[in-house]
Image (cartoon, rainbow, N blue to C red):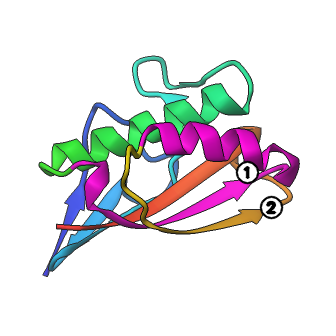
């Protein structure tokens, strides 16, 4: 029916959820925040540093299932400050190459561990 995804190369879930769930030909990743899986700490730095860590975490989970960023079909970005959108957009795009999945971006009042960004994705297997 479904498979729970877990890799040591991405941060462990900090609550009652999994890093991802594979159902049929789809992989649903839980929102990733900028936590370094080696230290289990939020990366220091600005929105660009945090976006880059989030994208590394997403890539690690995808790779654990033999997938890449090119398998992503939908992303949702949660920002604590929409004024940072341009910087996030540039950092996010640098991880995609020519790939352009569907995307939504929303500003939220607060994110776990008071991070600046969280991104969740859906990938086609």
**x, y percent for residue 20:** 33, 60
Describe residue 71's horizontal placement relative to residue 120 as left or right: left
**x, y percent for residue 111:** 73, 51
Question: Helix or strand or loop: what does disc 2 sit on?
Answer: loop
Spatial CA distance of label 2 from label 1 is 7 Å
> Total marks drawn?
2
Mark 2 touches mark 1? (CB < 8 Å): yes
Taking the magenta stretch, the answer to whether it contains residue 78 is yes
Residue at x 42% of width, y 65% of height: 101
Describe residue 3's horizontal placement relative to residue 30 as left or right: left
**x, y percent for residue 72:** 34, 61
Residue bearing the label numbered 1: 111
Other-residue count near label 1 (Cα within 10 Å), few / some / many at <14 / 14–19 / ≥20: some
Highlighted range, magenta: 68-95
Compare residues 103 and 61 and report the one nearer the observer: 103
Residue bearing the label numbered 2: 108
Taking the magenta stretch, the answer to whether it contains residue 122 is no
Query: From this viewpoint, is residue 11 visible?
Result: no
* 83 up-or-down from 30: above or below: above
């Amino acid at each position: 029916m479904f498979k729970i995804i877990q890799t040591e190369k991405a941060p462990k879930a900090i609550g009652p959820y999994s890093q991802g769930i594979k159902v049929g030909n789809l992989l649903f990743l839980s929102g990733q925040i900028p936590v370094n899986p080696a230290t289990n700490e939020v990366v220091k730095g600005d929105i660009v540093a945090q976006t880059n860590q989030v994208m590394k975490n997403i890539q690690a989970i995808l790779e654990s299932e033999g997938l890449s960023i090119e398998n992503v079909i939908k992303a949702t970005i949660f920002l604590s400050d929409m004024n940072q959108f341009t910087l996030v957009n540039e950092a996010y795009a640098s991880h995609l190459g020519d790939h352009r999945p569907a995307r939504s971006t929303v500003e939220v009042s607060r994110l776990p561990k008071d991070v600046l960004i969280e991104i969740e994705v859906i990938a086609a297997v």
